[in-house]
Amino acid sequence: MVPGFLPKLDVVDAVWLCNPWGGIQLILRKVSAAESLELHSYSTGANVSSKASALGKAFWWGDEEAGVDADNAANLNLPRSLNKVVALMGSRFADVREQAVVALHELLSSTKQHIAIAAVPGALHSLVELLADETLVSLAGDAHVHSKIVNDSHILARLIVNLKDRSGRVSEMSGWVLWCLANPGAEGASASSGAQGCLQNIVALLDAAGLSSHFGELLSVLCNNRCKPVASTPAFFESLFSLALSERVDLQIAAAESLQTLGREAESRKLIVQVPEWLQTLTGLVDKGRGSVAEKAANVLRDLAASDGAVRGAIAADAGALQVLVSCLVGESTPVQQPVAALLSALARNATTRQAVVGAYAGCLQGLTAALKDGSAAVQKAALEALWVVGTDDGAREELLNVPELVPALADMLDDKRPEAVVKAAVGALQSITGFPAIGECTADTPGCLQRLVQLLQCGSGRVRTCAAFVFSQLAADAGFQKVVAEEPGAIEQLVSLLGVGGPEGAHRPAARALHTLAWDLECRPLISAAPACLEQLFNLFKGPQDYVQSAAGEVLWFTAVGSASKDAFWERPGVVEELVDLLGENRTGIQRALSARILHNLTHDDKGQVDEAKTREIAAAPGCMERLFGLLKCSESSVAQWGLSALRALAAVPEIRTVVFGEPGFLQTLVGFLDLDALDESMLDVAPRVLHQLLSADAKNREAFLSTPGGLERLVLRGRIAGIPGALHKLVELLKPYWMREVALEALSVFAADNENGRAIAAVPECLTTLQTLASLPVAEIQEGEDPGLRELAAGVLSILGGAAEREGPPKQDAGGAEGAESGDGSEGSGTSEGSETSEENGVPNERDDPLIQRLMQQSLDRQHGIDGRGLLST
């Protein structure tokens, strides 16, 4: 609603900034008596002129025209209302100030009256205070106004003060205005791209105003400006590099600081590497830069190399640049060492640049090693990581052998008082190169090195423990260092402790490898068994739930159970036999059952490898021992059955125990079953024929003397019983075909062929004689590595035995072994003898008791063996 007094006014001076256009129309209708109207509105336009054409004096401004004044044409350029708009910029109301700035900017845009606006007292200062950056930049585009602004110390000082504003917007706007004041016409990216020396212009501007000390602040704002494309052109970076080479330290520092800031951004890094001689400039600053310039330049190089393969390649290919960088690592610790070490570490992590660095400049590895002595923890970590990576590269690793001071330097880094990251990198680097004999020797000889590694096994983090265990496993792999490792105080105990440490770091695996290798050495075994609580821990781990740990601990126990000194430690352990027998049970894992049988096998022998009959009897007498060993033969896991058979083989070396073993119902049939090529894997094929050969072999040339030998009669009878098992001899002949079995098969066949009847049965097996003839004439070149060189002679010997048996007995009888369960016409089992034979049979086996000499000796044997567990071999 318009007040009633308005129609009576002669002159109306209205400020209309915030009200809608409808209110202005109402005034024009109501103020009918007015002769002069001065209307201040930011949104009026040409429509007003039609309503005010009758007025003697009218001024308005808006979207299209500045206004008219019929009485005074000069007011067209400098209306009295402009002063009031400037005054309104100082209003205490924020919305009024904002609208006044917008109105002034729109007027400037429509009239281009830069000088007129700038001439209004306080206009420029108000615009600066209100951060009207676009209006100020637009005004500065006029040369006269630009001169007025840059010569106004108050305006420049105020802009400089605004640079310190922490809100971001104020400092960015002030920085943008100063940039445009220094580079007139460079308001946009396209303009600034051609502005050579743009930053030098800013320096000149600030120098002239006595504000040069604030250049770094302004440059920092420009580099962090996200609103304007100031620092996104090649020209800007060329200017920045130029300043970095200035003689003025303040400009060098400011430029280096900005390069460091911009180097963190991907787009800026692309522009940096487009600057001519960028690498030479930056390395020059690293080399000779004053103050913090060298460190900042090194930071730029580090950031560039971390993300750009081309940059890494350029640095690695420049021997001069590498020499400068490496020289920074030598001597007292300086801030520049950390980024340089990180840069070289980045080069080392890339396969291509790694080779270039190591090969192009030999001093690189020496420089990295030197940095370990006096560098900070960060420098040491970066240098160690670089050395670690080089050590894992098969192509570059040998270069580390040319750094004799490397191992002592790494050993010094293993102190557990150092930061964990440093220790981790140091032990990792040492682990990567310990496989070299020269490095291993240096590691073992460096004072305190092994002891520090033992400490890391005990106190280090997961990864540190793993690397330390790997160092020991690599040392143990060299026979020259095994005893050194085993004699190091605490080494054995800590490696054993690590067997029980699982988890993703896997420290138990290298620990197991180290112990396994040490246990192979005869001199180390007593040291393992003598280590405090070592056997106790190994047994506890062996009986634990984890398969890998069971295997590792059990194999160490198996090896250690050989040799007098270490074996004595086993026998001193109360109940050790019963403990191992318990681990043979069906409720145990296959690993525990197999390894327990292997340990028992070893405990039956003395330190010379001979059977210790007293200990063997003690083992066989343990409750459940024989029963459980026989049970192992029924296990579907071949390793369990194999070692069950091996343990029985060792026990059967004692005559009375042999009687029990071969008297076990079904044992011989099981043994023959192991000879089948398709039944089990070759591990059983390796054991079963050897059992037959070792337990049944004897000199058969003098039969009477042989039969008089203790146990000889047993063997003779056993040969008959085994040969009578369907398919037994046929399977032995089949074993002549695989090259890895033919030697032991020949040995077993030679034993059976010594008996005339068995010899005739063997000769009757299809392809037997042909195969033997082939082996007897085998070329030397076809005898496999590891086979007996006398293989051909052995085959010829079997042929000779078989031929002699045929001559003595006439035509061959039916093959007992080849019959494989054939039945006679009346349904009785095949005896393996020819029809009409007068030889009696027992359980399908030819009965040699019909021989008077055998009958007499059998009685003597029965007298000797009477009472053995009630189940003598002959009491079937």
Image: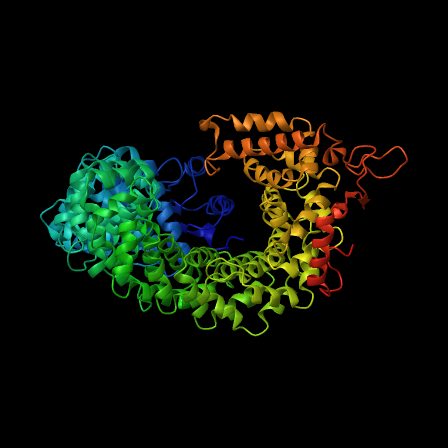
Looking at the image, residue 404 lies above or below residue 360: below
The one of 618 and 353 positioned closer to us in this rendering:
618
Q: Is residue 797 found left or right of 97 in the rendered image? A: right
Q: In which quadrant of the rendered view does residue 848 lie?
A: top right
The one of 39 and 543 positioned closer to us in this rendering:
543
Q: Is residue 529 found left or right of 354 in the rendered image? A: right
Q: Quadrant of the C terminus?
A: bottom right
The one of 18 and 808 positioned closer to us in this rendering:
808
Residue 289 on image: x %, y %: 14, 50
Q: What's the colour scheme? A: rainbow
Q: Is residue 543 found left or right of 296 in the rendered image? A: right
Q: In which quadrant of the rendered view does residue 63 lie?
A: top left
Tag count: 0
User: Which residue is found at the position 35% from the left and 66% from the top?
Assistant: 487
Looking at the image, residue 775 lies above or below residue 589: above
The one of 138 and 348 positioned closer to us in this rendering:
348
Residue 779 on image: x %, y %: 47, 25
Looking at the image, residue 694 lies above or below residue 678: below
Residue 469 on image: x %, y %: 41, 59
Residue 356 on image: x %, y %: 25, 37
Looking at the image, residue 537 lies above or below residue 647: below
Q: Is residue 827 visible?
A: yes
Q: Residue furthest left?
A: 247
Q: Is residue 74 visible?
A: no
